Structure formats: C-alpha cells, structure tokens
Image (cartoon, helix red, strand yellow):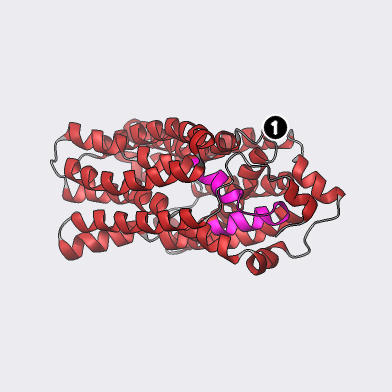
Amino acid sequence: MYFIGFVARPIGAAIFGHYGDRIGRKATLIVTLLMTGISTAAVGLVPGYASIGIWGAVILTLLRLIQGIGVGGEWGGSVLLAMEWAQTNKNRGFICSWPQFGAPAGLFLANVAVLFFSWYSGDQFLNWGWRIPFLISIVMVAIGLWIRLGILETPVFQRILAENKVERAPTIEVLRRQPREVILSALVRMAEQGPAYVFNAFVLSYGTLVLGASRNLLLTGLVAMTALGFITVPIAGALSDRIGRRKVFISGAVFVAAFTFVYFALLNTKVPALIFVAMALSFVPVMTMYGPEAALIAEAFTPRLRYSGSSIGYQLASIIAGGPAPFIATWLFSTFHSTFPIGLYACVCAAISICAALLLPDKTNKDISHEVHYGNA
C-alpha cells in the first residue's frame, strides 16, 4: 500500500503533464487538488477490518492510488504557476522554492496533528484518533481551491496559446525531444529523496523497535525536523539565485552524505536529547537541495513541454529513490546489523545526484522566455 502511491505518481505526471501543457496550468492544478484532497480525506472514513474485513485494505489501496496520481500532477503545476509568473529572471529560484516549501510545511502540520491527537485520544488513537487528521484535511482543500480559482493563467502559457504552439501530445514529445533532461531530473533527486525517506519514515520503525524510543519523542523530533526544513527551503532557493542552482544543490548533496553518518551516530547513543537533535537537524541538508531543485529541473525544459517534462522527471524519482528508500534501509540494517551501510547508501545517492546536476543545464538568472518564440525543444 505504501509503495503503490509512489508508483502512481509518474502515471499522474504523464496524465496531468499532458493536460497542463495542453489546456493550461491553472485548470489542471484545480483537478489535481480535488483529486488529492478528497482521496486523502476519504481515508478517514474507511471502515475498519472488523466491519468489512479485507475490503478495508482494498479501499485504502485504491485511495492511495488516486492520491498518488493526483500528487503526480500537482508538483509540476504548482512550480510552473509560480515560475511563469515571476517578473524577473533574478529571483526564479526563490519564487520556485515556495511550492517546495509546501512539502515540509505539510509534513509539519501533519506531524503536529498526529502528535496532538495521539495525546488527545490516548489508547484510542489506533481505533479512531488517527482518522481525525485525515478528515480535517478537507479544510486545507477548501482553502487551496479558493486560492487557485482566483489565480489567472500564466503569461507564458497564454503566449504559447496566442502563438499557436501548443503541442498535440506533449508527454510523447518531451520523451522524444528531451529524454536526457527527463532522466537527469529523476536521477538528480536521488540524494534528496532517498535520505529524506530514511529520515522521516525508516526512523519511526528504527526508533521504536531498535532504539526503544517513545512514539512521542519521535513525533516531536519529526515536528522539529520539518520546521527547520521549511525554513531552509526558501533560504536555499534565494541563495541559488545569487551563486547558482548547481552550486547550492551539490553542496546539499555533499552535506547529506556526510550528515547521514553523524545522524545515526547520534541516534545510536539512545540518549533522548541526542535523538531529538539528530532528527531535528536531518532535513537541513535535504532542504538545501530541495530549495533550488524546482527551478533547476523546470528551467531544463522548453515552455510548451515544461509541465510534462518536469513532472515526469520529478516523479520518476519516487520509484527509484523515495519509495524504495525505507525498504532499502531496512534490508541493509537487517542484513549487516549496522547503520553504517545506510550511510554508504546515502553516499551513493549523493554521487548519482551530483553527476546528474553537473549534466543538467544551469540557467540561473538566464532569460528563458525566448524559447517560446524560437520553439526550441
């Protein structure tokens, strides 16, 4: 069930990338919001095993699939809506970092909600307490829908329409014309997504089963982690406008490779204060990459194929990096009975990302609007 959502993301990227490049960024984003939001809230309504047996798991899997498809189309549209409304070329990294801000901010709110309702419901958390955060997420959907309905289509896509340069099959065209950029966009995320899911998913089972840490300590650590994470994102995005996307991103990749060893060294002390410090700091190197990543990837694609290309490349990483990461970490620990190989795994991810970043074009502060006029692919 966990992995099905990640498999669905590239599917959603291909579907909604097509429509985002065909009918526009705004309309597509409204559909992805409703699809993701309603399926997430519906999880809180699924009857338990005692009521409908195995069908509860079937329904959850289906909702996870729908959610994953919606998420797959969400990222590209939100980044392009921000990027293509940018008034100058000198702040695209900072502007594109704000949609990225939403991921750690959302994790922060989710972890706060789980922590609160875990305390509020006590022993009943597994019976009904876990449902409440899913149900109240519909409020965020309503706010997001109200905002998106009030936003105009981007000037870049309006120009594509005016010049009659809309691609008939953008998903197919981007795979034919820019396959290199699609592949590199997926590989560049290895150091960001792999360690990130070790830090926010694997740590929960490792912390409780191996370290014997309390659930509340781990949840509090995750809250601090995401809080520092969403502070780091716009700072890294703004810094990329000053010294370059590639430099900031690569520094983050090197940082995460080194930090993973420190992270597990602190966890393995089993001292609650050090466990908290390790968890709290763990998203800083990840978000150093995540901040400039949106602009680095989106700038690599021509505007009329940008929604499809950036979405597919970005979401393919869910299959090769984010989705498998907790399972790889679990296998490495169970096989070698040590966290050192997990640090080596982070180093491999970092090396792949650095190579991909060096091969992706760095268009920091460059005027890319001319690509619409000349029809570059």
Q: Which residues are magenta?
A: 292-313
Can the viewer see residue 80? yes
Question: Where's residue 361, x and y in %?
Answer: 56, 53
Amino acid at circle 1: Gln
Asked where in the image residue 21 lies, by quadrant, the reply is bottom right
Question: The C terminus appears in which quarter of the rendering?
Answer: bottom right
Residue occupying the point 50% across, 37% down: 240
Q: Which residue is mark 1?
A: 87
Assign a secondary structure to mark 1: loop
Mark 1 is surrounded, within 10 Å at the Cα level, by few (under 14), some (14 to 19) or many (20 or more) other residues, namely few
Asked where in the image residue 277 lies, by quadrant, the reply is top left
**In the image, 9: left or right of 108?**
right
288 falls in the magenta region? no
Provide the major secondary structure of the magenta segment: helix
Residue occupying the point 68% across, 68% down: 172
**In the image, 148: left or right of 325?**
right
Question: Where's residue 210, x and y in %?
Answer: 17, 50
Question: Where's residue 301, x and y in %?
Answer: 64, 54
304 falls in the magenta region? yes
Question: Where's residue 338, x and y in %?
Answer: 16, 57
* Residue nearer the viewer, 74 or 220: 74
Residue occupying the point 24% across, 43% down: 263
Question: The N terminus appears in which quarter of the rendering?
Answer: bottom left
Residue occupying the point 54% across, 35% down: 241
**In the image, 282: left or right of 190?**
left
* Residue nearer the viewer, 257 or 326: 257
Q: In this rendering, is residue 208 above or below 335?
A: above
Can the viewer see residue 1? no
Q: In this rendering, is residue 242 above or below 156?
A: above
Count up the numbered dots.
Answer: 1
* Residue nearer the viewer, 208 or 107: 107
